[in-house]
Image: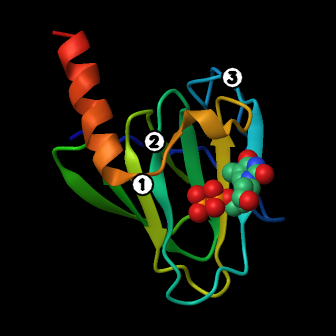
Amino acid sequence: MQVVKYMFQPHGDDRGQLVALEEFKDIPFKIKRVYYMYDTVTDVRRGFHAHKALEQILICIHGSCKILLDNGHEKKVIPLEKPYEGLYVANNMWREMYDFSPDAVLLVLASELYDESDYIRNYDDFLAFVKASEEENK
Ligand code: TYD
């Protein structure tokens, strides 16, 4: 399973750092939605879903957290610890977010507007969806 982590270009000078992200340039899709998580309670694990179509980039712009990605065959844990790192999360990918530091702010750039019908929230349904997609692409 290939993990795609972007290293964004910080524009640093003696005033500090600035990262700028443009759709189709730094981000591989049109950014239709931005959301972020903060004040995440210690030991909370969230996510527990996949998306049928949505693509995302996850950036821990402050603090740190871990992301578990699962493509139905393989799982990988990716730590996010730097504000210039972006983890690409494709559709058809189960994700869980955990180990949030108390100061963590997890920013998400998303390719679609919020749509509950794009969510797969049951793990067995996710495995069945992956299998069906693979059959379709054979
Ligand atoms: P939820 O799906 O539980 O977050 P996670 O997958 O990280 O556990 O979302 C929490 C709440 O926020 C839920 O009531 C739905 C709402 N929400 C929106 O209204 N818009 C959004 O873009 C997102 C991601 C969530």
Mark 3 is on which residue type? Lys
Q: Secondary structure at mark 1?
A: strand
**Neighbour class for label 1 at 10 Å: few (<14), some, many (≥20)?**
many
User: 20 or 39, which is in the foreground?
Assistant: 39
| In this picture, residue 112 sits left or right of residue 135 | right
* Residue at figure coordinates x 74%, y 33% from the top left: 113
Q: CA distance from mark 3 to mark 2?
A: 14 Å
> Residue 29's x, y, as percent?
61, 23
Q: CA distance from mark 2 to mark 1?
A: 8 Å
* Residue at figure coordinates x 21%, y 29% from the top left: 131
Q: Secondary structure at mark 3?
A: loop
Picture quarter with the N terminus: top left
* Residue at figure coordinates x 34%, y 42% from the top left: 126
| Residue ID for mark 3 | 30
User: 18 or 104, which is in the foreground?
Assistant: 104
> Residue 39's x, y, as percent?
72, 81
> Residue 64's x, y, as percent?
54, 74
Q: Which mark is residue 89?
A: 2
Of marks 3 and 1, the one in the foreground: 1
**Is residue 111 visible from the viewing direction of this image?**
yes
Of marks 2 and 1, the one in the foreground: 1
CB under 8 Å between discs 2 and 1 = yes
| In this picture, residue 112 sits left or right of residue 119 | right
Instruction: Classify 113 as above or below 124.
Output: above
